[in-house]
Amino acid sequence: MRAHSRNDLVLTRQGLRFAGNLWPCSIGRGGVRVDKREGDGATPSGKHDIVGLLYRPDRIARPAPWAVPIRPGDLWSDDPRHEDYNLMVRAPYPWSHERLRRGDRLYDLVLLTDWNWPWAEKGRGSAIFLHRWRRQGFPTEGCVAFRPDHLLSIAKRIRIGTRLIVPETLV
């Protein structure tokens, strides 16, 4: 396993270290956990590849050439009983899911991680994203959240091979 690179996003107690900056952020209400489970509100420790970038084209300009628009009906399955668990799906979808095209602005820009993806282990948790925060210090359901302008700056600097590094103990 390779050591941290300067392209990695490294979570610390003070914020996220990336591109020579320390970006304030919020993490899951359950803190950082090695044994992440669906619904525990924890941010999973580990080295997580950034595997996608989603954006709301009706609200923001395409942030990078590889960004994929969030369309009406785009959902994320969070039902561990279903084969689509922890995958992007389309409405109508009768199983438990999270709507990606939200009424609020939390998911106007979303960086996807490879946490428990693409071959999900049932119940280990789904949808660990980097997205906009509700407000500074307000915890997430397990994701890492940022001020909107900071998230956009980070998204524009992401490169192939960028990882989110979440230490077991934040220092």
Image: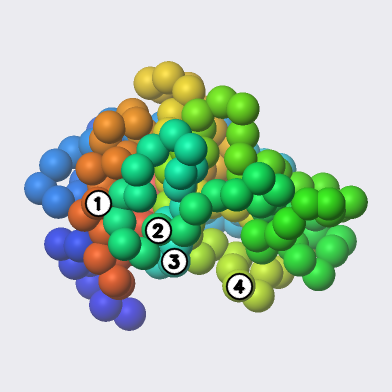
At label 2, counting other C-alpha atoms closer than 10 Å, the crowd grade (few under 14, some 14-19, many 20 or more) is: some
Residue 156's disc number: 1
Q: Residue at x 32, y 40 (%)?
A: 151
How many numbered circles are shown? Answer: 4
Question: In this figure, which residue is indicated by the disc labeled 2?
Answer: 67
Question: In this figure, which residue is indicated by the disc labeled 4?
Answer: 118
- Residue 87 vertical placement versus 44 (above, below): below
- Disc 3/disc 1 C-alpha distance (Å): 14 Å
The reply to whether dot 4 and dot 2 touch (C-beta < 8 Å) is no
In percent of width and height, residue 141 lies at 59, 37
Residue 51's disc number: 3
Q: Residue at x 71, y 48 (%)?
A: 73
- Residue 141 vertical placement versus 46 (above, below): above
Amino acid on which disc 3 is placed: Val
Give the quadrant of the N terminus: bottom left
Task: Choose top left, top right, bottom left or bottom right for residue 102.
Answer: top right
Residue 43 visible somewhere in the drawing? no
Amino acid on which disc 4 is placed: Pro
Q: Nearer the viewer, mark 3 or mark 1?
A: 1
Q: Secondary structure at mark 2?
A: loop
In percent of width and height, residue 55 lies at 45, 47
At label 4, counting other C-alpha atoms closer than 10 Å, the crowd grade (few under 14, some 14-19, many 20 or more) is: few
Observer-nearest of 136 and 159: 159
In-image side of 105 versus 1 (left or right): right
Q: How is the image coloured?
A: rainbow
The reply to whether dot 2 and dot 3 touch (C-beta < 8 Å) is no
Q: Residue at x 26, y 77 (%)?
A: 2
Q: Secondary structure at mark 3?
A: strand
Q: Which of the marked residues, 4 or 2, is nearer the chain's N terminus?
A: 2
In-image side of 52 versus 82 (left or right): left
Residue 41 visible somewhere in the drawing? yes
Amino acid on which disc 1 is placed: Lys
